[in-house]
Amino acid sequence: MKAVTILAALIVLGACNSAPEDAPAREAKSQAAPTGSPTDFVEATEAAPYAETPVLRAQVILDHLGFSPGVIDGEEGQSYRAALRGFQAANDLADTGQLDEATLAKLGEGRATAATRVVIIPEQFAAGPFIPDFPADAADQAKLPRLGYRNLLEALAERFHTTPEAITAMNPGVATLAAGTAVRVPNIPNADSTIPGDDPRGWSATLASLGVAAQQPKADRVVVDESEGVLKVFSADDRLIAQFPATMGSSRDPLPIGEWKILGVSRNPDFRYNPKLFWDVSNDKDAQLLNPGPNSPVGVAWIDLNKPHYGIHGTSEPHTIGRAESHGCIRLTNWDAARLAQMVQTGTAVTLQK
């Protein structure tokens, strides 16, 4: 999701110092909840041959196992290498960060996972609604009932944990995307996004739109490591059970090193944008309350820490994770933030370290 202006990027990168309003408490509010997203992308009956690379397949398997490579694009970038190192550490393999023989064998154990699949775009998914002229200014964004995707390609990219450019490259013969179109995507399967009880903010639909299952392993503690550029999740028996690439801090707003804890999780949060908290935004701008959506400055989830204005959250710019700076907070892709939101709870310990 490319930023349309510099201001839009500043709003996203500066989101951390202005937490969602009453972050842990607002999940009962029903304003602007998604009306529902289909969970089932059925397979196309015919598909042209496609040359799948070992890197692309490894990225897909790592994503399945909870060791996120960030965007799945077949490229050997830093997030991919970090995912390999996390997987290797969790499986007592040599920490090479490379797809070596031992790692390749471990990734393939009992898995006949193809790197891609060809699916039919469902009618409801293709219906949006989309916002092709997504506004740059927060005051204009505040007028929108929901900060949704700009177009179908952007929505597909998030659903299958990739980028619009990668989907375009996988489908050179597809001129137009629409309901009923057969399209090749990374092999992120349909997920059981059903959550128990009431769902006033449409979280189940959001999970479905991101290909994230509601049931996830439970975190005992979280470690955010600035030197490695990752967020690690550990179980009660101290096993590394998940890892996500993250963007954290900057020279102006360094990561608050220390021991913290989670105060609560806001799913599909509203976001109170206060320019006075950002050193790189004019104080002449008015504060705004922005409605939820994947293109919110905090993405689809805000995980509140017991340090004022700091948290772990999603982003409208998944391709920047691990590359751009933030204003102190920890940013993940929307699909990784959603997954983490299902793993943690109030009181979960969080270590922020260099």
Image (spheres, rainbow, N blue to C red):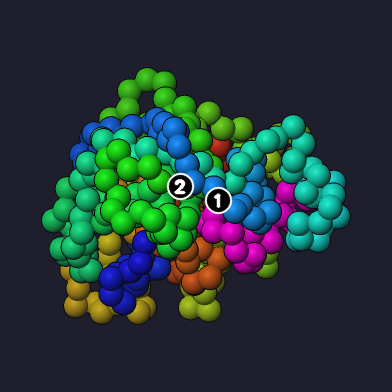
The reply to whether callout 1 and callout 2 are in contact (CB within 8 Å) is: yes
Pick out the residue farthest to the top: 197
Pointer 1: what residue? 50
Instruction: Say whether residue 191 is left or right of residue 278.
Output: right
Magenta part of the protein: which range?
Answer: 68-88
Could you tell me the amino acid type at mark 1?
Tyr
Q: CA distance from mark 1 to mark 2?
A: 9 Å
The mark found on residue 297 in the picture is none
Q: How many marks?
A: 2
Q: Where does residue 299 sit, x and y in percent of width and height?
A: 37, 52
Judging depth in this view, the residue of 287 and 224 nearest the camera is 224
Could you tell me the amino acid type at mark 2?
Arg
Name the residue at 36% across, 61% down.
Answer: 1
Q: Is residue 157 above or below residue 38?
A: below
- Secondary structure under tag 1 reads loop
Instruction: Say whether residue 347 is left or right of residue 151.
Output: right
Name the residue at 19% across, 77% down.
Answer: 284
Q: Is residue 72 magenta?
A: yes
Q: Where does residue 83 sit, x and y in percent of width and height?
A: 67, 54
The mark found on residue 184 in the picture is 2
Q: Where does residue 62 sit, x and y in percent of width and height?
A: 65, 47
Q: Would you say residue 325 is visible in this rendering?
A: yes
Q: Is residue 252 above or below residue 139?
A: below
Precedes in sequence: disc 1 or disc 2: 1
Judging depth in this view, the residue of 70 and 189 nearest the camera is 189
Q: Where does residue 73 sit, x and y in percent of width and height?
A: 54, 58
Q: Nearer the viewer, mark 1 or mark 2?
A: 1
Displayed quadrant of residue 24: top left
- Secondary structure under tag 2 reads strand
